[in-house]
Image (spheres, rainbow, N blue to C red):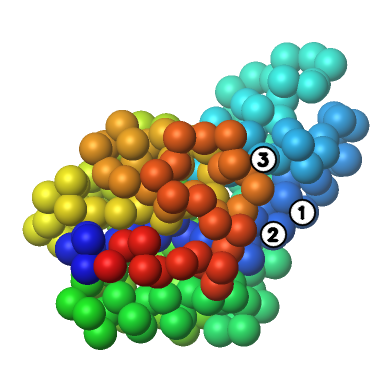
Amino acid sequence: MKYKAVIFDLDGVIVTTDECHYKGWKKLADEEGIYFDREINRRQRGVSRMESLEVLLEKAERTYTQEEKTEMAERKNNYYREYIKSLTPADTLPGVMDFCSYLRENGVKLAIGSSSKNTPTILAGIGLDNYFDAVADGNQIKNSKPDPEVFLLAAKLLGIDPADCMVVEDAEAGVEAALAGGMDVLGVGDSVVNTNATYKAESLAKFNIDLIK
Ligand code: B16
Ligand code: MG
């Protein structure tokens, strides 16, 4: 295989939680009377909770204190955690398990590189908490995507050179982070069509694996 390791983003690549993030932010925005739509939500993908709140507040009609911001981020996270309570292995996205099994059978290491502090809960929900060779997430990093920190940490935990890793991402910020870390990247979904991703596919199920053999 062309790579010694593949590092997966979580929300929107492994699992459908990107919709739960949208619903959580939408509920908060409606309560606060702030305009919010899916286009704005796209820009929150891959970035940390507090940075996501700042994206939402661009449409606010007044400024919010730090205390208010902390409360709002917590409120959204509580809604989000309610939604992800019902996650099951069926919420794993199409093609993920086949892709991972194939890579593993061919000696490729598998890791998670996610900005989310809820990563452990999500992986447990979909039954993959002991599946990956390394997990780097929002609890271990200072700078979220587009900074490469989370992907570089995943590579370090695996003991593999970043140049031998491929990242799978669904967000523009994540594609930029992988490239900044010196890694090739497979962009999945429609948010990455205008990025410099090394490979692009509609979903993991549609990716031609021969390209990385
Ligand atoms: P949390 P990823 C990211 O996860 C999400 O895409 C992004 O929308 C979210 O704001 C961020 O995690 C932080 O999540 O509030 O759960 O800590 O795509 O990097 O797996
Ligand atoms: Mg994502």
Instruction: Decide which of 38, 53 is in the foreground and name it.
Output: 38
101 lies above or below 8:
below
Looking at the picture, how far across and down is residue 103, in whole percent? 30, 75
Q: Which residue is mark 3?
A: 42
Label 1, secondary structure: give it.
helix
At a point 31% along the width and 32% down the height, the residue shown is 180
First in residue order: circle 3 vs circle 2: 2
153 lies above or below 126:
above
In contact (CB < 8 Å): disc 2 and disc 1: yes
At a point 44% along the width and 42% down the height, the residue shown is 197
Could you say which quadrant of the image residue 98 lies in?
bottom left
Foreground mark, 1 or 3, reads 3
At a point 84% along the width and 16% down the height, the residue shown is 61
At a point 56% along the width and 68% down the height, the residue shown is 206
Looking at the picture, how far across and down is residue 162, in whole percent? 18, 47
As shown in the figure, which amino acid type bears the numbered disc 1? Lys
Q: Which residue is mark 2?
A: 20
Is the residue marked by circle 2 packed among few (<14), some (14-19), or many (20+) residues within 10 Å?
Answer: some
Q: Is residue 160 visible?
A: yes
As shown in the figure, which amino acid type bears the numbered disc 2? Cys
Count of numbered tags: 3
